[in-house]
Amino acid sequence: MPAPKQLDPSVSLPALYGAKVRKLRIRAGWTQKQLGDRIPIAHSRIAQYELGKEIPTKRVSDRLDELLGADGDLSDLWDHLKRVPWSDAVQKYMQYEVKAIAMHKYLAHSVPGLLQTEAYARELMREAQPWCPADVIEERVAERLARKAVLARAVPPLLWAVLDEAVIRRAVGGPAVMREQLAYVLEAADAPNVEVQVLPFAAGAHAGMGGSLTVLSFDNAPNLVYLEGGFLTAMVKDRTAVAQHSHRYDRLHALALSPAESVGWIERAMEGFLTCSLQETF
């Protein structure tokens, strides 16, 4: 019998839920089939829950909580899952992100999540989801900040980010928040595994005008591409399509300012935000 697939509960809330289910099931001494028979549902559903690939219905989650003696923990976690939903593409991306050895990103509208400050991330989420209660926003902010742990590993992945000028110019949260955010980007760029470039408006039309893209590279697996445009996201695995999107990224990389030029450009943008902050003070 093959060894069970390793779980990483830090990847996402569904992964955390699944890891909890597996831990409680093993403690109870049941196989996936034995647990499924008691609900009853197919054991393949139990496997998908444990891997974080599916979320059970409320009825099934409450039954799992009862059978596994979770004392309400699974039911509470399920409530968070439904309040803080991620699309399938986003969930898959977060699972791949923690396994990548290199991430090449073009950002059309915002600083990449791995380089966001708390205040900046909160403002983005407030504006993108004005219908969400404040506590839900805080949960999503905390989850995004937790993802930054990938860059603190003993052997961290390469993160190469090309930022559109709009990312630098737009005062998300106001001048003070934006100045703090840009300072954080520059601090991160001092690390040997992080490179940042700015793609200025003066570059004209370019290959990334349809939205943001990320090319993920792995140690023993083919590259993948993640596309973002507004509320539409997609994970691309087809090798021809991946090669085409990688070509798009290469063209953006070539158009952008050099890393050294980009640092100076960001520093000047910070000075502009400081001036704005002082004017607001008076």
Image (cartoon, rainbow, N blue to C red):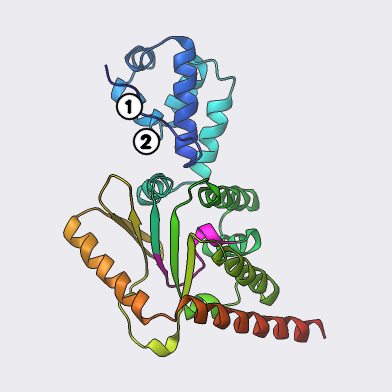
Magenta residues span 105-116
Position of residue 210 measured from the top left corner of the image (x, y, whole percent): 33, 73
Q: Which residue is mark 2?
A: 54
Vertical comparison of 266 with 181: above or below = below
Position of residue 44 measured from the top left corner of the image (x, y, whole percent): 29, 25
The answer to whether one can see residue 209 in this image is: no
Left or right of 41, for residue 25: right
State the residue at coordinates (43%, 65%): 160
Question: What is the spatial separation of the Cα atoms under label 1 and label 2, in whole angstroms?
Answer: 8 Å
Asked if the residue at tag 2 contacts the one at tag 1, i.e. Cβ–Cβ closer than 8 Å, the answer is: yes
State the residue at coordinates (57%, 61%): 116
Q: Quadrant of residue 170?
A: bottom right
Q: Quadrant of the N terminus?
A: top left
Vertical comparison of 246 with 209: above or below = above
Q: Nearer the viewer, residue 165 or 256?
A: 256
Callout 2: SS: loop
Badge number at residue 45: 1
Vertical comparison of 281 with 69: above or below = below
Quick one: label 1, few (<14), some, or many (20+) residues within 10 Å? some
The answer to whether one can see residue 49 in this image is: yes
Position of residue 236 measured from the top left corner of the image (x, y, whole percent): 26, 56
Amino acid residing under circle 1: Arg
Position of residue 215 measured from the top left corner of the image (x, y, whole percent): 33, 60
Amino acid residing under circle 2: Glu
Vertical comparison of 245 with 145: above or below = below
Callout 1: SS: helix
Q: Nearer the viewer, residue 43 or 248?
A: 248
Q: Quadrant of residue 39?
A: top left
Q: Quadrant of the C terminus?
A: bottom right
